[in-house]
Image (cartoon, rainbow, N blue to C red):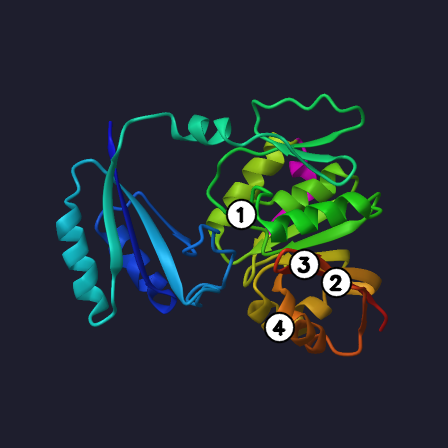
Amino acid sequence: MPYLQIACQLDAGYCQLAEDVLMEHGAMSVTFQDPGGDPVLEPDPGTNPLWERVTVLALFESGADPEALRRRLQSELGEVAVSDWQAQTLRDRAWERAWMDDFHPMRFGERLWVCPSNGRVQEPGAVVLKLDPGLAFGTGTHPTTALCLRWLDSAPMDGAQVIDYGCGSGILGVAALLLGARSCHGVDNDPQALTASRENAERNGVSPRLLLSLTDGTPAPAPADIVVANILSRVLIDLAPRLTGLVRPGGQLVLSGILEEQVLSVVAAYGDGFRFHQPVIEGDWALLIADRTG
């Protein structure tokens, strides 16, 4: 069966309203990208993504009327400009298989590999994380995730208790468990992220050691040896009191999703209780590692 894909651009502050309208009128999925093609990370519900303008991609069954959808969306958004409207018919195909055909094994650090379930890694001593398309963001292809994965590969994980705050697909928590962590508590504000994390943990044989909860749910995370949060810098700043309390004395805090020019603001939000290492930079993005001293 063919599908209809709608693409358009609008101001980032109207993403949630646009998603609600499109889903109400039959969208099978709605995703956001910046105009350069990068996926939106994991902002809090109702908050704006990082970019001023956002590309909206919505997938419908073939019977949808693209012109009616355009009129409905524009009506709901009022004076907000919806630009670059495109409607494209996508022929029936095995979507997940096609995605995996373009997703090849990727190496992060010395041992850690991420690859689809149909992939093979021949490297001696490789730690292989199997990951297929799922409900939530996170395959390792975005620089912020790649920075975290390389750090996890280099860190002493044996016996560590880890918190993956904003777990998304669960890729960071599952990687930590595969690398030797004793346990991981994954936390997210989206129930679909917990579903994706659980499925990926089961696929990799680590589900008994992964505990999952919503940010406002139970069980609440107990303080851990390592807290990893790959979110947006503004959210990391807002979460500083929360994340600070989740790191045991002597433990480590790992923060990503930060643009290089935002590093000082994020460091300042965590006060005097942490000693920050030199940021690790990849492109425009920074990874911050801090030791809790107090």
Q: Nearer the viewer, mark 1 or mark 3?
A: 1
Q: Which residue is mark 2?
A: 279
Question: Marks 3 and 2, how far apart in space?
Answer: 27 Å
At horizontal 67% and vertical 46% (from top left) the residue drawn is: 173
Q: Nearer the viewer, residue 215 or 250?
A: 250
Mark 2 belongs to which amino acid? Pro
Question: Marks 1 and 3, how far apart in space?
Answer: 14 Å
How crowded pointer 3 is (Cα within 10 Å; few <14, some 14-19, many 20+) is rated as many
Question: Marks 4 and 2, how far apart in space?
Answer: 16 Å
**In the rendered structure, does residue 146 fall within the stretch colored magenta?**
no
- Depicted 232 relative to depicted 210: above or below: below
Question: Marks 4 and 3, how far apart in space?
Answer: 19 Å
Q: Which mark is residue 237?
A: 4
- Depicted 126 relative to depicted 191: above or below: above
Mark 1 belongs to which amino acid? Leu
Span of residues in magenta: 205-212
Q: Nearer the viewer, mark 1 or mark 4?
A: 4
At horizontal 28% and vertical 51% (from top left) the residue drawn is: 23
Mark 4 secondary-structure assignment: helix
